[in-house]
């Protein structure tokens, strides 16, 4: 994986400074923060009250609220977190030893029984967390601080799965009201205690004075969820927030007094074509749509050098992806003949509506009649997953859920996958992905992932467009913001504001 990079952007020309006049009304009139508190404006509001069994899971680890049993190092290998060590005791059995000094935010000491119960709730959740797509597991306590996990099939990357933000271990109280939607307020183990979630607009966190490693550097976090990218950037420039994520490319030149951290990501923007119903069940029409998309043109026009044109599903953040077996071989393209299609995306990532506009233009030039739908992610997610649109432009990390490319394929490209935007289903491919998931050697798993990628590109069920980089805006005086390519960490115990 390429090293992360941080840089200070140079001052822009006077014309760019005019962009400082940006709507930031969502922050106006708020009281000044307490000394040292860190103020954040994040792009994606909660869709399920920050339940880990949803797309909110990443918020729990990025904000230091919840912790899974293990973490991943920069190379993707598991490292201790709540568990100190692990061993495979049989073909389908693992045992993990837990720390004996972990206390939940409500004062309950962590035991193996609590950890096993948390994993059991995750395994029983519906839809299944993406990290457990296709996985059947049973977790039991063996003594006070040892968890035994048994899987239905051999799973050489089980420990990597356990690093997923979806599998954070919460206090028993989190599951009492609804085990299928655990409540993380006051029930985590991390350096920050989630005190309040205000709908889709805000969250308040306080330092955990009883954390096993001592209290964090900042006394608390004040989080605002601001889907509008210009408002986030304007709030950072105006000194109303200290950290923003998803800095829009259009605002980079105007951020002159703050730092922008730029981190290459295992993340791909792609056009997903609904192969289950509608016009794109027809392979020649999918081929026509694929031929109408020009990744080089899109990256040049929209990202201004801050992304890479996609050659496939897996990008330059994964060096092994350079060893692709062959270019895709699509079916012969059909004449669309004015076929009507609905293209959807979400506005929380500023570049996606722009990409949708360019892609729609290319589809129209190819002979399609295109309707574009753009909504905030929290209001469009259910429709995306239900296959309500003919085509979707989405931004997806292929290592976020499991830290393993085969795990991503199981979640996104199998018949029972929980994030199958293309509504693609081929039982034969399911079986090949299942077989790859049992392969213990990383190189063989990567080879299998590239073979699967080639087959999906042949069928034109998706068209990769770009591989993105994280762009984080950080105010002067703020240090310790994580530059994490896995996007699982943002605020740490060391993050501080002077």
Image (cartoon, helix red, strand yellow):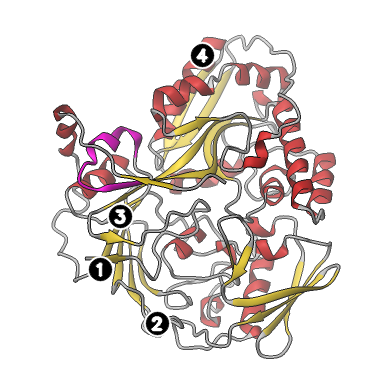
Label 1 element class: loop
Q: Which of marks 2 and 4 is nearer the N terminus?
A: 2
Magenta stretch, residue numbers: 248-261
Viewer-nearest of discs 2 and 3: 2
User: Label 1: few (<14), some or many (≥20) within 10 Å?
Assistant: many
Which numbered disc, 4 or 3, marks the residue that appears first in the sequence?
3
Mark 4 = which residue? Answer: 364
Give the Cα separation between the discs numbered 1 and 3.
11 Å
Q: How far apart are marks 1 and 2 (CA)?
A: 17 Å
Image check: 231 left or right of 433? left
Labelled pair 1, 2 in contact (Cβ < 8 Å): no
Q: Could you classify mark 2 by the number of other residues whose Cα lies within 10 Å: few (under 14), some (14-19), or many (20 or more)?
A: few
Q: Which of marks 1 and 2 is nearer the N terminus?
A: 1
Residue 336: image location, x then y, percent: 62, 12
Q: Which of the image's four quarters has the C terminus?
A: bottom left
Image position of 6 with respect to 305: above or below: below
């Amino acid at each position: 994986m390429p090293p992360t990079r941080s840089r200070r952007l140079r001052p822009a020309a006077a014309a760019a400074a005019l962009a400082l006049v940006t709507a930031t009304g969502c922050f106006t009139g708020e009281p000044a923060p307490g000394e040292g508190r860190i103020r954040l404006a994040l792009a994606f509001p909660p869709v399920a009250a920050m339940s880990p069994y949803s797309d909110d899971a990443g918020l729990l680890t990025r904000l230091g609220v919840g912790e899974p049993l293990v973490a991943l190092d920069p190379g993707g290998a598991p490292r201790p977190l709540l568990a100190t060590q692990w061993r495979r005791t049989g073909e389908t059995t693992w045992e993990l030893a837990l720390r004996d000094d972990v206390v939940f935010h409500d004062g309950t000491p962590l035991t193996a029984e609590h950890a096993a119960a948390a994993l059991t709730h995750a395994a029983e959740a519906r839809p299944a967390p993406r990290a457990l797509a296709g996985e059947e597991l049973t977790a039991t306590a063996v003594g006070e601080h040892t968890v035994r996990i048994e899987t239905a099939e051999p799973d050489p990357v089980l420990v990597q799965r356990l690093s997923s933000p979806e599998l954070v271990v919460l206090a028993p109280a989190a599951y009492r009201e609804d085990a299928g939607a655990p409540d993380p307020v006051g029930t985590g183990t991390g350096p920050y205690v989630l005190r309040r979630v205000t709908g889709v607009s805000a969250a308040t966190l306080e330092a955990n004075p009883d954390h096993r490693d001592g209290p964090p550097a900042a006394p608390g976090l004040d989080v605002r969820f601001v889907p509008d990218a210009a408002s986030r950037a304007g709030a950072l420039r105006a000194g109303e927030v200290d950290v923003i994520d998803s800095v829009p490319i259009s605002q980079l030149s105007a951020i002159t007094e703050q730092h922008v951290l730029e981190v290459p990501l295992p993340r791909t923007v792609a056009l997903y074509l609904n192969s289950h119903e509608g016009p794109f069940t027809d392979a020649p029409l999918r081929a026509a749509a694929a031929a109408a998309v020009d990744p080089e043109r899109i990256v040049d026009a929209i990202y201004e050098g801050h992304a890479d044109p996609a050659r496939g599903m897996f990008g330059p953040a994964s060096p092994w992806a350079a060893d692709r077996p062959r270019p895709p071989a699509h079916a012969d393209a059909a004449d669309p003949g004015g076929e009507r299609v609905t293209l959807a995306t979400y506005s929380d990532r500023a570049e996606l509506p722009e990409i949708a506009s360019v892609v729609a233009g290319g589809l129209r030039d190819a002979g399609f009649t295109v309707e574009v739908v753009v909504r905030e992610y929290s209001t469009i997610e259910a429709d995306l997953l239900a296959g309500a649109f003919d085509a979707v432009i989405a931004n997806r990390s292929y290592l976020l859920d499991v830290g393993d490319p085969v795990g991503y394929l199981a979640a996104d490209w199998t018949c029972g996958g929980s994030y199958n935007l293309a509504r693609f289903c081929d039982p034969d491919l399911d079986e090949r992905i299942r077989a790859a998931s049992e392969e213990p050697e990383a190189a063989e798993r990567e080879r299998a992932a590239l073979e699967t990628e080639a087959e999906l590109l042949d069928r034109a069920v998706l068209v990769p467009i770009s591989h993105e980089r994280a762009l984080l805006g950080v105010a002067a005086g703020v240090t310790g913001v994580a530059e994490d390519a896995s996007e699982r960490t943002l605020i740490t115990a060391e993050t501080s504001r002077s």
